[in-house]
Amino acid sequence: MLKYGWTGRPLGVESLAVGRYKLTPSGHFHGWTGTHRIAAAHAVVMQRPDFRVPIVLVNGGRPSRKPLVLKTTTDMSRYLLLRARRDPVAALLRAEMRINREADKAGVL
């Protein structure tokens, strides 16, 4: 990431109104997809504060008081919640699940 920048899919994140659910000290977000990429991006930002990550906001960017993600326990239940809400992040989460399943079958994950 330091050398080539962000080359992957955008991250699905939920904007939070206030409270203790902070993804970073500078923003109130909760990650829905790409947890490993979020961790890697945090490491890069420590070295390059100008580094930017493409995101897609859950719930149309409307802040939640309590993260919607906490209503679910699995990727499938999160996908079904988003799909029922007709949230565009559902397609992103489905792609993540498909990629993870294929990597698992290939013994990469």
Image (cartoon, grey):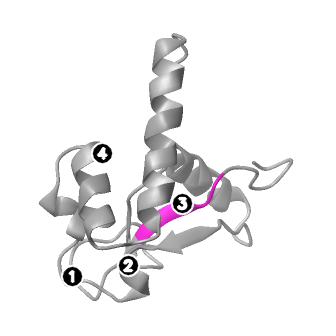
Question: Element at badge 2?
Answer: loop
Residue at the spot of label 2: 28
Question: Who's the residue at 56% across and 47% down the image?
Answer: 37
Q: Earlier in the sequence, mark 1 or mark 3?
A: 3
Instruction: Say what amino acid the circle numbered 2 marks.
Output: His
Residue at the spot of label 1: 19
Q: Earlier in the sequence, mark 4 or mark 1?
A: 1
Question: Element at badge 1?
Answer: loop
Instruction: Say what amino acid the circle numbered 4 marks.
Output: Asp
Of circles 4 and 1, which is in front? 4
Query: Spatial distance from mark 1 to mark 2, Cα to Cα?
Result: 8 Å
Label 2 crowding class (10 Å Cα cut-off): few <14, some 14-19, many 20+? some
Chain part drawn in magenta? 9-13
Question: Who's the residue at 43% across and 68% down the image?
Answer: 13
Quarter of the image where one finds residue 81: bottom left
Query: Spatial distance from mark 1 to mark 3, Cα to Cα?
Result: 22 Å
Residue at the spot of label 3: 11
Residue at the spot of label 4: 75
Question: Element at badge 3?
Answer: strand
Question: Who's the residue at 25% across and 87% down the image?
Answer: 18
Of circles 3 and 4, which is in front? 4
Is there CB contact under 8 Å for labels 1 and 3? no
Q: Is residue 87 left or right of residue 96?
A: left
Is there CB contact under 8 Å for labels 2 and 4? no
In the image, farthest residue toward the right: 3
Is residue 104 inside the magenta stretch? Answer: no
Considering depth in this image, is 52 or 45 the residue closer to the camera? 52
Instruction: Say what amino acid the circle numbered 1 marks.
Output: Gly
Q: Earlier in the sequence, mark 3 or mark 4?
A: 3
